[in-house]
Image (tube, rainbow, N blue to C red):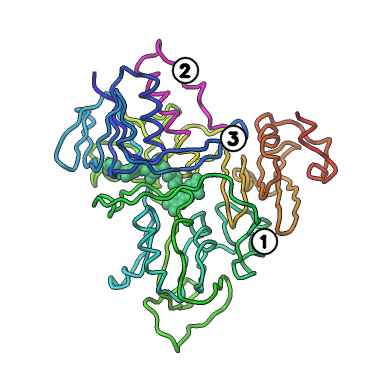
Amino acid sequence: MDPLIVIGGGIAGVTCAKSFSIDQPNHPVILVSASSVVKTIANLKTLGRSIDMFDVIEQNANTLKSSNLQVIMNKKVIRLDSNEHRIQLDDGQWLKYGKLCICTGAKPRMINVDNQNAQQFIRYIRDTQTAKDFTKLLAGSRRIIVAGNGGIAIEIVYAVENVDIIWAIREKRIGTVFFDAGAAKFFTEFLSNHGCKKTTGKPIKRTRYGQMEINDSSNKNEFGVALGPDWSQQLNLKGVKSRKKIIFRQKIDLDKSESWNIYVELTNGKIFGCDMIIVAIGVIPNSDVFVDDNNHTGLQLDADKGILVDREMRTNLNDIYAAGDVCSVNWPQSPHWIQMRLWTQARQMGFYAAKCIQWHLNQTNSDNPSLYFNFEVFAHVTQFFGFRVILLGLYDGQKMDTNDYKILCRVIPREAYTKVILKDGRMKGCILIGDSNLEETFEFLIYNQIDLTRFGDHLLDDHLDIEDFFR
Ligand code: FAD
């Protein structure tokens, strides 16, 4: 029997290979990983129907092996021959597959650099090695520029110390990927206080995970596995100054008295000098190897280079599936779900792809995958600036006309921020910052589209215990 081959040792690939090999113990599975460490999850906590909280840990790829799961590590796939149902590794070896699942993740989007000499002062954080390189350069830095406005940029601005940070963002406010204007204002208070960290004084209860040291050469390229959630805690993220200053959307002029490693010009015409630029402006799916310049395979890609998959994670090519950051969903999306390249979705897709592949192999011996379809309500749990942040449904009014919905908001300065979006009296999405414990109830309200008209504008009032109503 030709094996299921899963390409990629990130959350999506590992989840897919492991789930399939457990469900189908007599079916051979091969996981191909470009690195010797793989990502897996630990401390899974379910806070609602699709609200999962977990840690991402790195593990030696060998530990995944089982009687039907073989791991080929430190090997890259360099070619796909879909007609012959085979892939080629970088050592020349061809592997034949029965089914193939592509989980090759994404790589950082680059910026244009005129002067090649400047490259040495630019960092893109993706994996352990790039994070370490960044730390080394930071150790001698007086001023850095952070380009980007998503989760990684936010984490860097929050975590680095003893350095001036110019935060270069296109938008008018910080964190536009995850925050609305109100949440951005809530967090800006912290930044204006010189980027002070939120300290609760309470010990952190969950286990912290370090990144593994990898000495193999495969890690020195763009194929490393994306970092785990505690990446910034393991590193000494300090510059040379005695304190930290965050400059964003403020006017500062080129300091002519100091010389810098690199100068950048922003679209507002301002030129700034700095010791390093950290670029975190999004990712591009790692699909190149499967299409090459002439797309000889005919694999269909989205405009963002994501491999298009149907509702059962199938690409347009026979017996080939894709999951995680590398794919773009191409099914009619549920009204309250959106695709974002995040761990939660990588895990859900890897798991679901395993169920779909089994179903297509042998319908009598496996469950209908629709039982596991978990893409109804968008849910993301994370931490920003030391606060727990939960985003549910259309948390920023996505897919809706601004005049079409109503917002209710409750703010306890420096403690909590709660915002819900209602349309026709029904909850469409919400942002929960701080420990409100409302996530399960609000997820229920979004799933079931309960009519909340009777609460008027009082849904978030202090005296109204909304959880009790829907228990
Ligand atoms: P990846 O984890 O990227 O794994 C891809 C795998 O494919 C790797 O093992 C790679 O080696 C392998 N590979 C690639 N090409 C080949 C090839 N040709 N042959 C063989 N193997 C190959 N998400 C969150 O939800 N929360 C966060 O707080 C968060 N923080 C982040 C912080 C950083 C610094 C970064 C970079 C990302 C962060 N993300 C976060 C995003 C998250 O890491 C990704 O969404 C997730 O890792 C995607 O998982 P994946 O399995 O699809 O891909």
From the viewer's side, name the closer residue of 411 and 212.
Answer: 212
* Secondary structure state at the residue bearing disc 3: loop
Magenta residues, start to end: 348-377
The answer to whether mark 2 and mark 1 are in CB contact below 8 A is no
Q: Residue under label 3, please give it.
A: 377
From the viewer's side, name the closer residue of 54 and 309.
Answer: 54
Q: Position of residue 435 (x, y in %)?
A: 68, 46
Does label 2 or label 1 sit earlier along the sequence? 1
Does label 2 or label 3 sit earlier along the sequence? 2
How far apart are the alpha carbons under marks 2 and 1? 46 Å
Residue type at tag 2: Asn
* Secondary structure state at the residue bearing disc 1: helix
Label placed on residue 97: none
Specify the quadrant that holds the C terminus.
top right
Residue farthest to the bottom, as pictured = 257
Magenta stretch holds residue 358? yes
Q: Residue under label 2, please give it.
A: 368
How far apart are the alpha carbons under marks 1 and 3? 26 Å
* Secondary structure state at the residue bearing disc 2: loop
Label placed on residue 185: 1
Q: Position of residue 332 (x, y in %)?
A: 51, 32
